[in-house]
Amino acid sequence: MNKREIANLLENYFPDNKLILLSNRQPYVHKATPRGFVCEMQAGGVAIALDPVMKMVGGTWIAWGSGNLDRKFVDQKDRVKVPPQDPKYTLRRVWLTEEEVENYYLGFSNRSLWPWAHNLCGEVVFRRKFWNFYKKVNQHFTQVALDEIENKKSVIWVNDYQLALVPQQLREKSKGQMIIFFWHIPWPNYDVFCILPNRKEFLEGLLGSDLLGFHTSNFCQNFLTCVEKELEAEVDFESSTVRFKDHITKVEAFPISIDFEYFSSLAGSKETRAMLVKLRNRFKLDNTILGLSVDRLDYTKGIPEKLKALELFFERYPRYQGKFIFVQIAAPSRTKIKAYRELREEVIKLVNQINQKYEKKNWQPLVFINRLVDHKTLSVYYRLADLAIISSVRDGMNLVAKEFIASQIDQKGILCLSEFAGAYEEMEHSIPLNPYYTEGFADAINRAIELPLERKKERIKKMRNYIKEYDIYKWTYDIFRSLSQMLIPKPKKDFDEAFIPK
Ligand code: ADQ
């Protein structure tokens, strides 16, 4: 996608508008480490996807200052220009108290909404205190956004499930702004939706936006059905709009993507090629197949399910014993929540158990790298891998799938992808897998490995062409184009004409 086209669209339709983006997580964190202070990006789909957009468009990004040195690097208005080495936009940090983090972030966002949206009702915890803090922190973000608007015409782009009440709060306090909301995770069906207490208020919060985006048309349909059943609103499934209290919200699917050129050229860079040789030697890959997964260590990503499928794969297809290594890179995530700590223990236990089985054969099938790695290293692993496995039990999209494809410059890798990841709708040339069905999963791994090289190349080529066209810039363009169409006055229905007697 040509970045100039986005700039033209913005100049034509939103000439004097300031862009204000809100998300819970910030793109850059200042923190102290044993190596000294660092300013780094975090492993989180939302920040990684939106950073290139903000670098291109400019504006202000409002997010929680979660790093232990964040306060040291902001001005009196809590602002800092980022990226630090080549500033392109402003990051405005919002400060949260410990109690707010506990209840709004770890509580309602991550123990109530996150498992709820992913259909994992057994993990859901609802507490009144969580909800009260959620409302309070959403108000706080709204106030900061109002402060940034300074009564100027703005496009306010609110992101994700932590800030669902902001659109309505903004609409009540400021007139004439365009509000986009993008929901980055799945939207559940009506039966699951109904377990959410305060669900009416939650929907009303989102319906404060002019444009409400989801990754897939299925999530849009789920949302519209919930609104229709829950609120006294006019829902038009054909035009995908909701009229509620005289305000119209357009609901549309925009499958998020990645900066294709960035990942593709990183994969072809001199540095990557040099590191590739080193790692090939380290893993002794001349006669060995390398499988790879990159995930936040989250129970929605199906990591134990994948390890169990790999264990079965080695048993069912013993010819791969000693000839296959699987690398799981897992970024620590939400470590203050018990379910996440337990997941880590379970994963380590499974990895050790499987490795011990083959100790005598002098072969270590699994490598577990439990840390954040930089993009250059990630790129080397993406190139090194003969197959990537995405095993989410449920996922809004999954950017790793697209990053892996973009990095396949020599088109030799293949993607095994869960049918329950949003990305599956677009990646029809991947090898499908069902993480709940261990035997089928093990067979899918075998099928992927045994696919003839020419067939792998055909598949990868098709997926690369697709992502090259539908990259993160095209995603942004589509969102703004849709918003701009809402500004054009709709032609008056020819009601009168139709009833003029001939
Ligand atoms: P996430 O659940 O965070 O995002 P995902 O889309 O896979 O999931 O994005 C993860 C990002 O973190 C990727 O860019 C990946 O490269 C990076 N990452 C993961 N592990 C890493 C590691 N160890 N080191 C470095 N980087 C790592 C949410 C939704 C997704 C949706 C995105 C965007 O859950 O479904 O795709 O938002 O909308």
Image (cartoon, rainbow, N blue to C red):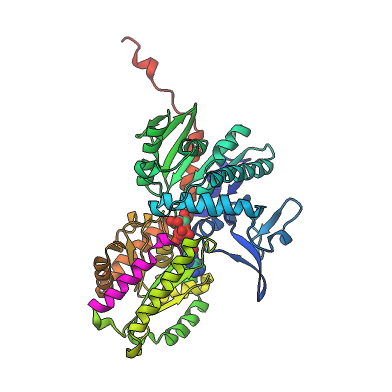
Quarter holding the C terminus is: top left
Asked if residue 390 lies left or right of residue 88, the reply is left
Location of residue 459 (image quadrant) = bottom left
Span shown in magenta:
297-316
Query: Residue 51 lies in what quarter of the image?
Result: bottom right
Q: Position of residue 497 (x, y in %)?
A: 37, 16
Q: Specify whether residue 368 is in view.
A: yes
Tell me if 320 is positioned left or right of 124 in this view.
left
At x 29%, y 63%, the residue is 433
> Per the image, is 473 magenta?
no
Q: Judge whether 106 appears above or below 274 on screen.
A: above
Q: How many numbered marks have been drawn onto this rendered protein structure? A: 0
Q: Percent from the top left, x then y, of residue 317?
A: 23, 78
Front-lying residue, 455 or 426: 426
Q: Residue at x 71, y 53 (%)?
A: 78
Q: Position of residue 391 (x, y in %)?
A: 35, 64
Q: Is residue 313 magenta?
A: yes
Question: Picture coordinates of residue 290 (x, y %)?
Answer: 36, 78
Taking the view exactly as shown, the residue that stands out farthest to the top is 501
Q: Which residue is found at the position 25% from the left and 78% from the top?
A: 315
